[in-house]
Amino acid sequence: MSVPDAGHADASFRNAVLAPTVAVASFQLGRLLSRQRLLLAGLGVIFPAAVMLAVRRTAAEGLDRDLAVMMIYALVPEAVCMLGLLVTMCPAVADELERGTWIHIAVRPGGRRALLMGTYLAAVLWTSVVGILAACLAVLVARVPQPLPLVGMLAALVVLSTLGRAALFALPAVILPKRALVASVAVALVVEYLAGFIPAVVNQATVSLRLRSLLVEWMGWRQKLPVEMQLLIDPQPAWVQIAAVCGLTVVLLVAAVKILNFRQFPPSVEI
Amino acid sequence: MIEVVDLVKHYRASDGSVVRAVDGVSLSVAPGEMVGLLGANGAGKTTTLRVLATLLKPTSGTARVGGCDVVTDPLGARRHLGYVSATTGVPDRLTAREIMRSYGRLHGLDEGPLTRRIDLVVQSLGLADFIDRPAGRLSSGQRQRVSLARALVHDPPALVLDEPTNALDVVGARDLLHLLDGLRADGRAILLSTHRLHEIEHRCDRFVIIDGGRIVAQGTPPEILGPHASLEEAFFAALAAGTAS
């Protein structure tokens, strides 16, 4: 018998943090490869393209590029990413409680952190892939001119959306695991879509403000926007918006890990 | 190796009342010793074991595993502890080898030592016949053996088992308990909770009987059995005496 840190384990960042996180992430990605989840992902990829196809057919002279971009933005980095994360990130703790695996993970030295970070990584990867495929297909179907730069921009917005919002949904996942889905929908509505549109200090801490501002910046729409609409975006350069999303992500994830480390679940909570 | 002193754990129920799940429990388990924690459902066995496993924080009192306090040094306590519960929580689609590898990585084990450790556990628990079969195709006895293997992957000196034979048939339970005998012989401290008394009557070095969150009797088998013909009789006598006092 030996105790790992005294014998064959080492406490390097790779072994203590990275390897456990990757182990959980690969396990969670494996879970996402079920028929049901693949079907849902397929729907997520096809849905925006189907909407764009329907809209394009109603427009006799083809779709206006700006209008198409706005629609794809609303459908993919907003709707598809949000729904994808609700399915993948919200049940981070609840799934383990229900399957009886929580206790076996939580009794490992870095188990709780690895569970959250691994699930986060899997949710971001899975939803980003779905979002990028959905954006590609939607741009293709919309038949907008210069599609490649558009796909690149939308891919960047998808990745930033999933990074920030998966971290946002990590909080309800650890605070209210059994009601995480409902709580996350409430967080999405209140934080992202209510506070995010209030032109005040409060919207600075939302992902939606940063994504909107990036969209306006990268599409060169700033000069075209009416004055009242300019209140809904942040005038800072793109790197500030990206840094803000990354900073927000780190703060939310650290908070979620801290909370999860302190959480106790009495035996009656498990099913 | 396992030490619990005056442990108290209270929960706040949904109606606001305080539930005293554990109320002043003290016990210890030395290396190479197997202690049976006996009690009816709701007696406080699982809560006690979960405090030891750092899953719950005590309201007061102390609990230590391998000398590490579960509150002030939970990571140290987790490194010294293997935990097995009635619900195996073994993912259906993974093989026993994959499960052990995943959990070994949660302990920060390097690839080489982890592979060697898995081989050793497979050999000592007799998993070779189904090590590469998805857990969904294993019997409940085999799944519980995989759960035990998962608990042993980091070679812990202390083992806590919460009703591990609950879902097993007679043969599965006997095999599992036989494996525990071997682990005790290796020098591991084993704390085992159960309410299937006949299974452990002749296996444990000591028994702790708990009722309503309090210890009503503890001692070696002769001390617990006294004039009673079986552990079951002694158990009910201890409960009756505890209730009367």
Image (cartoon, rainbow, N blue to C red):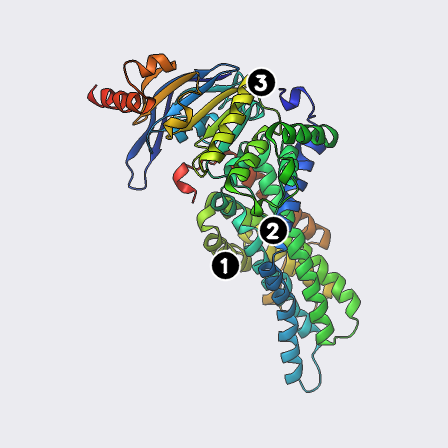
Give the residue at x 58% y 25%: B79
What is the number of callouts on the image?
3
Instruction: Say if mark 2 contacts mark 1, CB within 8 Å.
Output: no
In three-dimensional space, the C-alpha distance between marks 3 and 1, rounded to whole angstroms, equals: 57 Å
- Crowd band around label 3 with a 10 angstrom C-alpha radius: few (<14), some (14–19), many (20+): few
The residue at the point 38 percent across, 28 percent down is B45
Q: Are tags 3 and 1 found on a single chain? A: no
Amino acid type at circle 3 is Asp
Residue B34 in percent (x, y) is at 47, 19
The residue that label 1 is drawn on is A189
Please, which chain is the residue tagged with disc 2 on? A
Looking at the image, residue B134 sits to the left or right of residue B25; the answer is right
Asked if residue B184 is positioned above or below residue A87 in the image, the reply reads above
Disc ID at residue A42: none
Q: Chain of mark 1?
A: A
Tell which subunit mark 3 falls on: B
Separation of residues labelled 2 and 1 (CA atoms): 28 Å
Residue A123's spot in the image, x, y percent? 62, 51
Give the mark nearest the N terminus, 2 or 1.
Answer: 2
A232 relative position to A263: left or right: right
The image position of residue A45, as x and y in percent, is: 65, 66
- Disc 2 target residue: A31
Q: Tag 2: Cα neighbours inside 10 Å, few (<14), some, or many (≥20)?
A: some
